């Protein structure tokens, strides 16, 4: 089923051909109808995977497309989560304004981290972002007045169009809607001039600058958007778990997100989603195995990268390519 | 005044261990451009090997050597099996590979040796102390400082004055050219990883008697060691030592006089500050990229 | 887009549908219990509680079970992370179909699953979280807790230090999380009540390896007594460090440091420490507890390195088993609740003095004090009670 493109417009289109549309409808329908057939605990895990997918996509914009490294994304996750949580509890805002504010605040933090990061590369950037993530965690633990400290911050019962978000299904659909919107935006973004600028920066930032790509603008944009996605995901995570506690935002989380992006495949939106889904389901599936869990999880990550450094998306691409000229 | 000196002494003690960890990280980064996040767990593994030897009744020195050798072997094997064969690996996927390996190792240690904290016997005592005026320094601390200095000197000698060191530097600068000139890059890199692993294990063995042995004991020291490496300059071995000592002292004095609660935050703020002002670290060479 | 469709298929295939039963978790020959423990990650030491529970269940099954039913304990790992604990609990309730959740380690984890468990009316026995989290909480019908309150325990320790040890000033060394902070709160309340001053509050992070500055800070406070709310490792570290710099206050600790491993870790420096306990410690002359430990280590030899937590697992599960016994062969949730409410001042093999009632869900409200002497624990006082809160 080789698809030939005959016009630029056709190339730009996200969904092409009847297979594309059929696939999309199947996927969309399946995801929307999922709560009606799946058992509730499964729904919970899928909701969690969707939240992680948003983080992975956001992180991929920064890491995969722009070539920057960030080991502190749990910090942005926390900023979004606590902004949302505090606006809901302390100021009594409703869901949407609070979520949008969380998004904006995270983006601002992303910008603030991105500015100094302009001068740093490689391990230095890794450490700077690591330090940011750890610093945020420390502040959350110690500044109790702000974060509720270790007692946690409980999210109230939030209503959205009359339905409580404490209901698993309502929460799932809300997360699905937000995630779909953000993924769509990401896909459009990477196919636009912004995405091309990012990739240029990743591949050779000096050449990019010489060709007219404003490094400052696009690098900080990457950080800000990446932080925005992660912050929104953090806000949603608050609803999924029901309360916020600094323990949810440690270095382990940052590493976890990072591994989702790399295992899924750098510079691939669907790869990030795949990576997030797989790495959310895997610990759950292995949770009966006790101490062997970390061994298996670590081994899984290593093996995927050993045999497919491009991640799961690259492997999927190879499979597609293999079948493209079938039965030859 | 004595109080300040005590805090400084404590800081130097902690700092010397951060410095040892940083040495391993910097060595690897200099020679193979890989940020090894599994360094802490490799070190702990070496200590567990030594612990097993001791509990089996091996003579002390043999058990320690066994631990060092074990860590070196595992480190070199990791390089050979998981890092080297992957040609298209990006820096990022290498980082994740080391992180995956770290998780794998820590899970393995929990499974093989259990989760309970253990006492690691060591000839240098943590409890016997030297007193200088009002300042207390334990035997172990003095020993760590001494060992650290010896290791730095030894490493410098290795890198600057031996053929292996020359080969390491050549491979670090340009692997292809080095290979064209007959340097067996693969073997040299494996040797580098082995040395780094042994260094980490040495740091762990000095740390374990003080902080008690369990699979996660190196978590915090590793992060601090990493920060120290950046502070001192990822390209510079003396920088790693300087960074470690400075970080240790700064932390201790801050905890003593300003706030114990925010002790950990300080380290990270310091790192960020250094990175903003002088990214190549205190003793590193400024990083110039050729286009 | 096609990738995404495949994704969808993968996800859907990974979700087997749940099965139903008349009373969830109860069949003709089995009662299913679930728990979520940290079996991996830095908190894995506490996971022995789950293994202790499994071993206890196996022992009971070898004796014929309860009313002809075997006990099956399903343990899931959550690495001490709240989202995983929440997912595990949902899986246990919906996919495995458990009759009760027994234990659940971590106050944060308990908060994460509380609403779900209450909403689904799942029997919940003793989450190991500070008891004050239940004060004033509605919907406790299916909740039965036999776990001490860190706050009350601290008050008792401060009182003992003030009255029996003559301490006028106290310093608190505490873990910077809910466990330690509750201990600190109790210490502060106790200080007011017993009229002593708190001269230093020194926190530490559980990932910290070096506590030398903390020890110096404690010494500078010149407190007569130091209260320890820490894990065994950090308890040992701080005590050794304090001895090293020549500071020897009276030492008091929470029951979590009543673990015999302290003698190995802290050596001589641990002698003289006064700790609380809520079940008699092994090796202190209580034959029933010693027998229980022997049984556990026989069934699961790996528990030998972690006897304290293994016994804790037995202690948590014991009241539940007693409830099963009293409910009789016909087992439903309602009959179980009635059976539990009939427990008055009951002594199990490990746990002692459990009382529940129609308005009482806090099973134990007392601790005793014990002192470390010559490498072993010796009982110091009789049971000291504190007011019940729920």
Image: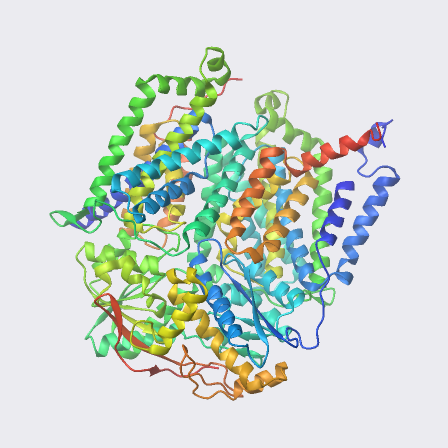
Residue C11 % position (x, y):
71, 51
Q: Is residue C344 above or below residue C126?
A: below
Residue C155 % position (x, y):
33, 76
Q: How is the image coloured?
A: rainbow
Q: Is residue B245 above or below residue A283?
A: above
Q: Residue furthest left?
A: B133
Residue B196 % position (x, y):
38, 32
Quadrant of the image occupied by residue C260: bottom left
- Is residue A86 visible in the rendered image? The answer is no
- Is residue C322 visible in the rendered image? The answer is yes
Which residue is depicted at the point 64% across and 55% down?
A: A48
Q: In this view, does C334 lie above or below B196?
A: below
Which residue is depicted at the point 50% across and 54% down?
A: A291
Q: In this view, does C143 lie above or below C10?
A: below
Q: In which quarter of the image is the N terminus of chain C?
A: top right
Q: State the residue in front, A21 or B272.
A: A21
Q: In this view, does B138 lie to the left or right of A190?
A: left
Which residue is depicted at the point 38% across and 23% down?
A: B285
Q: Total marks drawn?
A: 0
């Amino acid at each position: 089923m080789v698809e030939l493109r005959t016009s630029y417009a056709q190339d730009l289109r996200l969904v092409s051909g009847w297979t594309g549309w059929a696939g999309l409808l199947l996927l969309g329908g399946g995801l929307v109808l999922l709560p009606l057939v799946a058992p509730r605990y499964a729904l919970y895990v899928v909701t969690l995977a969707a939240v992680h997918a948003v983080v992975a996509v956001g992180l991929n914009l920064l890491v995969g497309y722009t070539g920057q490294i960030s080991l502190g994304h749990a910090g942005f996750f926390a900023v979004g989560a606590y902004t949302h949580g505090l606006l809901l509890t302390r100021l009594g805002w409703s869901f949407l304004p609070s979520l949008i504010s969380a998004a904006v605040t995270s983006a601002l933090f992303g910008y603030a981290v991105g500015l100094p990061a302009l001068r740093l590369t490689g391990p230095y950037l890794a450490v700077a972002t690591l330090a940011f993530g750890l610093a945020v965690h420390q502040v959350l633990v110690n500044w109790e007045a702000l974060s509720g400290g270790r007692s946690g911050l409980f999210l109230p019962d939030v209503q959205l169009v009359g339905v409580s978000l404490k209901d698993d299904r309502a929460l799932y659909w809300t997360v699905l809607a937000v995630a779909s919107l953000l993924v769509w935006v990401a896909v459009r973004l990477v196919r636009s001039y912004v995405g091309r600028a990012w990739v240029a920066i990743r591949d050779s930032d000096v050449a990019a600058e010489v060709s007219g790509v404003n490094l400052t603008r696009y690098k900080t944009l990457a950080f800000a958007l990446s932080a925005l996605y992660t912050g929104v995901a953090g806000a949603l995570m608050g609803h999924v778990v029901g309360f916020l506690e600094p323990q949810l935002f440690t270095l382990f989380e940052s590493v976890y997100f990072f591994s989702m992006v790399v295992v899924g495949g750098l510079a691939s939106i669907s790869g990030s989603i795949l990576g997030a889904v797989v790495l959310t389901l895997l610990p759950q599936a292995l949770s009966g195995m006790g101490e062997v869990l970390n061994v298996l999880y670590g081994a899984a990550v290593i093996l995927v990268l050993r045999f497919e450094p491009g991640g799961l998306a690259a492997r999927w691409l190879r499979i597609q390519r293999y079948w493209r000229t079938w039965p030859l | 005044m004595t109080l300040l000196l005590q805090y400084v002494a404590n800081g130097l003690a902690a700092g010397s261990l951060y410095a040892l960890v940083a040495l391993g990280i910097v060595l690897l980064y200099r020679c193979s451009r890989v940020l090894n996040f599994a360094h802490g767990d490799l070190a702990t593994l070496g200590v567990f090997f030594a612990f097993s030897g001791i509990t089996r009744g091996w003579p002390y020195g043999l058990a320690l050597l066994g631990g060092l050798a074990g860590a070196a072997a595992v480190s070199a094997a990791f390089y050979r099996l998981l890092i080297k064969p992957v040609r298209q690996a990006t820096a990022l996927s290498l980082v994740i590979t080391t992180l995956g390996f770290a998780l794998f190792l820590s899970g393995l240690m929990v499974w093989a040796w259990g989760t309970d904290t253990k006492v690691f016997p060591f000839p240098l005592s943590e409890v016997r102390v030297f007193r200088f005026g009002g300042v207390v320094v334990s035997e172990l601390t003095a020993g760590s400082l001494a060992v650290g200095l010896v290791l730095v000197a030894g490493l410098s000698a290795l890198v600057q004055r031996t053929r292996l060191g020359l080969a390491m530097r050549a491979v670090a600068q340009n692997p292809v050219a080095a290979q064209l000139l007959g340097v067996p890059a693969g073997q040299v890199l494996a040797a580098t990883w082995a040395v780094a692993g042994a260094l980490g294990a040495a740091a762990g063995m000095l740390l374990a008697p003080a902080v008690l042995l369990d699979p996660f004991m190196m978590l915090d020291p590793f992060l601090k060691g990493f920060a120290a490496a950046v502070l001192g300059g990822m390209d510079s071995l003396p920088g790693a030592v300087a960074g470690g000592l400075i970080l240790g002292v700064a932390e201790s004095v801050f905890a003593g006089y300003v706030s114990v609660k925010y002790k950990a935050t300080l380290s990270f703020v310091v790192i960020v500050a250094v990175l903003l002002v002088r990214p190549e670290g205190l003793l590193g060479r400024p990083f110039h990229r050729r286009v | 887009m096609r990738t995404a469709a495949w994704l969808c298929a993968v996800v859907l295939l990974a979700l087997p549908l749940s099965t139903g039963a008349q009373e969830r978790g109860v069949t003709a020959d089995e009662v299913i219990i679930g728990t979520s423990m940290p079996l991996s990650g830095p908190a894995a030491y506490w996971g022995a509680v789950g293994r202790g529970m499994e071993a206890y269940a196996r022992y009971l099954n070898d004796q014929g079970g309860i009313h002809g039913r075997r006990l099956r304990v399903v343990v899931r790992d959550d690495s001490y992370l709240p989202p995983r604990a929440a997912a595990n609990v949902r899986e246990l309730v919906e996919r495995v179909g458990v009759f009760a959740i027994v234990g659940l380690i971590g106050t944060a984890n308990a908060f994460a699953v509380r609403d779900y468990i209450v909403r689904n009316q799942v029997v919940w026995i003793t989450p190991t979280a500070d008891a004050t989290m239940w004060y004033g909480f509605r919907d406790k019908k299916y909740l039965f807790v036999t776990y001490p309150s860190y706050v009350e325990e601290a008050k008792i320790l401060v009182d003992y230090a003030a009255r029996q040890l003559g301490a006028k000033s106290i310093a608190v060394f505490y873990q910077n999380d809910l466990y330690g902070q509750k201990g600190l709160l109790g210490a502060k309340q106790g200080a007011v009540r017993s009229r002593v001053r708190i001269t230093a509050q020194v926190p530490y992070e559980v990932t910290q390896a070096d506590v030398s500055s903390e020890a110096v800070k404690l010494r500078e406070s010149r407190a007569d007594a130091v209260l320890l709310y820490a894990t065994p490792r950090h308890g040992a570290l701080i005590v050794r460090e304090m001895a090293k710099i020549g500071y020897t206050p009276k030492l008091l600790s929470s029951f979590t440091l009543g673990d015999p491993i302290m003698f190995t870790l802290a050596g001589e420096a641990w002698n003289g420490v006064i700790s609380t306990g809520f079940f008699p410690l092994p090796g202190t002359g209580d034959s029933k507890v010693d027998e229980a430990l022997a049984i556990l280590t026989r069934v699961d030899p790996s528990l030998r390195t972690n006897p304290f937590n293994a016994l804790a697992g037995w202690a948590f599960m014991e009241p539940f088993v007693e409830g099963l016994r009293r409910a009789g062969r016909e087992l439903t949730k309602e009959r179980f609740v009635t059976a539990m409410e009939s427990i008055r001042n009951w002594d199990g093999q490990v746990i002692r003095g459990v009382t529940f009632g129609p308005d009482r869900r806090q099973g134990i409200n007392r601790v005793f004090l014990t002192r470390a002497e010559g490498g072993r624990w010796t009982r110091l006082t009789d049971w000291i009670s504190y007011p019940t809160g729920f």
